[in-house]
């Protein structure tokens, strides 16, 4: 597993684990991040900007700190 932050733009992966505190875990779950969920890294913002991730038909923008806590399987 690798952190979501390391996933290349345009690559697909599956959420394998979420290593976050309870509040962030609840927020990520509400946005659709669940173990086994297929995701796509749409694009990464320049200069440490946010990440654009697609979960099915839902687009989500994440901070890099949040993406470090989501681990995916390629």
Image (cartoon, rainbow, N blue to C red):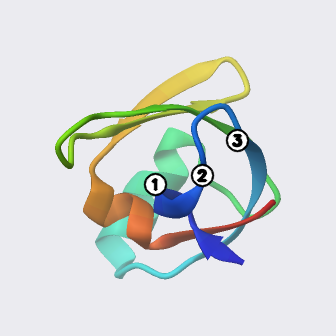
State which quadrant residue 65 falls in: bottom left
Q: Earlier in the sequence, mark 3 or mark 1?
A: 1
Left/right placement of residue 12 relative to residue 50 reads right
Q: Which residue is mark 2?
A: 33
Out of 10 and 34, give the one closest to the viewer: 10
Q: Position of residue 44 (x, y in %)?
A: 40, 37
CA distance separating discs 2 and 1 = 5 Å
Q: Which residue is mark 3?
A: 39
Q: Residue 17, which numbered label? A: none
Q: Secondary structure at mark 3?
A: strand
Q: Secondary structure at mark 2?
A: loop
Q: Quadrant of the C terminus?
A: bottom right
In the depicted structure, whether residue 19 falls above or below residue 61: below
Q: Quadrant of the N terminus?
A: bottom right
Q: Are marks 2 and 3 in contact (CB under 8 Å)?
A: yes
CA distance separating discs 2 and 3 = 9 Å
State which quadrant residue 66 falls in: bottom left
Q: Earlier in the sequence, mark 2 or mark 1?
A: 1
- Circle 2 residues within 10 Å: few <14, some 14–19, many ≥20: many
In the depicted structure, whether residue 60 falls above or below residue 14: above
Q: Are marks 2 and 1 in contact (CB under 8 Å)?
A: yes
* Residue at the image position 57 percent from the left and 36 percent from the top: 9
Q: Which residue is mark 1?
A: 28
- Circle 3 residues within 10 Å: few <14, some 14–19, many ≥20: many
Left/right placement of residue 45 relative to residue 60 reads left
Q: Secondary structure at mark 1?
A: helix
Task: Tell us which disc is closer to us: 3 or 1.
Answer: 3
Q: Earlier in the sequence, mark 2 or mark 3?
A: 2
């Amino acid at each position: 597993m690798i952190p979501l932050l390391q996933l290349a733009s345009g690559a697909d992966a599956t959420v394998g684990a979420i290593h976050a505190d309870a509040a962030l875990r609840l927020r990520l779950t509400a946005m659709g991040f669940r173990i086994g969920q297929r995701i796509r890294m749409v694009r990464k913002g320049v200069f440490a900007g946010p990440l654009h991730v697609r979960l099915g038909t839902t687009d989500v923008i994440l901070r890099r700190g949040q993406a470090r806590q989501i681990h995916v399987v390629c």
